[in-house]
Image (cartoon, grey):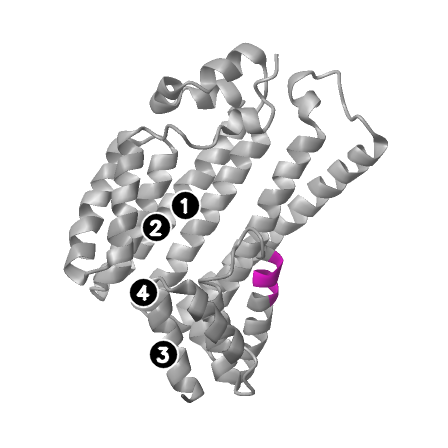
Amino acid sequence: MNEETKILKAQQLVTAGDLEPAEKLMRELYKSKNPLIKLNAILLLDAVVNPVEENEKLLKLAEEGLTIATQIGAMDAFGILLCRKAASLAARLGLMTHRKSCLNLSASVFNWIEFALEDNKQEFEYIVAEGKRINQQTEDIEKQVLAHIEEYGDSSYKSQIYMSLGELYSSKFMQAKADLMQGGSFKTMVANQYWAKEIGIEKYLLFDRKSRRIIHTLWKQCVRYFEMCISESLKVNDQQHIAFAYYNLAIKYCLEFRFKKSKGLLNKAEPIAEKLNERRLLQQIRDLRKNIENKNRGGRDWVKEFGLDMP
């Protein structure tokens, strides 16, 4: 089997959900002397590498892919890899946000307590500075990729980029919520109730006005990019991409306890997925419907995880 055939086989395996043999095949193709084959292997590896356990590896792959894409003039891959680099940087920032909260758990509740150790304080200050640097990097990448698609992109390409940017802003939104939460016994107890999340008052209990403005801006930008993705996909009648965009946006609304909006998007995605026989997507849609029916019960308790339920 030649390398071109192996790439096609790897794509089929990823589509079918057979990720283990696909990863084995792609790691073999990653060693190819042909830069185009290696670039395609890098693009496909992103679908199978664990973004939590191997995020730094994904970042290195994106940077290596950007170098190859520039050398061979693969401009379609260039924009996608820019977005993946931004996603990996955002994932790194997410882990740092969690670590920062762990370093300063008591201070989230008791304003007069700072750090247990001087080393904790130094690490905290480093994370704050590094977080600002990463945020600036992702903003610069966003500007770069938007300029790139204006020069090189058709509607199909733009829709892929807009979906990636929507996912980026979803990550930024969740990280900002985790970072800007303010503790307190009674408020956090009330805010952590499902009814409080459903009617949206937890934002007023856990965030000050400035913080609410920040997270609202990030949320609106996330939704805006997904809507732009759907709009561009409709122009070229890319039904598969439309279905995935509806589904991915439905997840975001579900996480925000906006179940009616989430159901409406799933109602649009499901018939398209059925028509295209997208089995994996159909199962994902059905799983999300069950989660909506259960109103997100059984998920992660962010308030307790970040130590904001302390007395």
**x, y percent for residue 275:** 14, 59
Q: Quadrant of residue 31?
A: bottom right
User: Who is closer to the viewer here, 99 or 159?
Assistant: 99
Residue shown at the point (48%, 64%) measured from the top left:
46
Quick check: marks 2 and 1 in contact, CB under 8 Å?
yes
Please say if 21 is above or below 175: below
Residue tagged 2: 226
Residue shown at the point (43%, 50%) measured from the top left:
167
Q: In which quadrant of the rendered image does the C terminus lie? A: top right
Q: Which mark is residue 16?
A: 4
Q: Earlier in the sequence, mark 4 or mark 2?
A: 4
Q: Which mark is residue 222?
A: 1
**Horizontal arrangement in the rendering, residue 186 relative to residue 98 (left or right):** left
Q: Nearer the viewer, mark 3 or mark 4?
A: 4
Distance of label 3 from label 4 (alpha carbons)? 12 Å
Looking at the rendered structure, the kind of residue marked 2 is Phe
Q: Earlier in the sequence, mark 1 or mark 4?
A: 4
Distance of label 2 from label 1 (alpha carbons)? 7 Å
Looking at the rendered structure, the kind of residue marked 4 is Ala
Looking at the rendered structure, the kind of residue marked 1 is Cys
Q: Which mark is residue 8?
A: 3
**x, y percent for residue 151:** 42, 72
Q: Secondary structure at mark 2?
A: helix
Q: Which mark is residue 17?
A: none
Instruction: Give, as a single range, the part of the protein colored magenta.
Output: 56-60
Main structural element of the magenta stretch: helix, strand or loop?
A: helix
How many labels were placed on the picture? 4
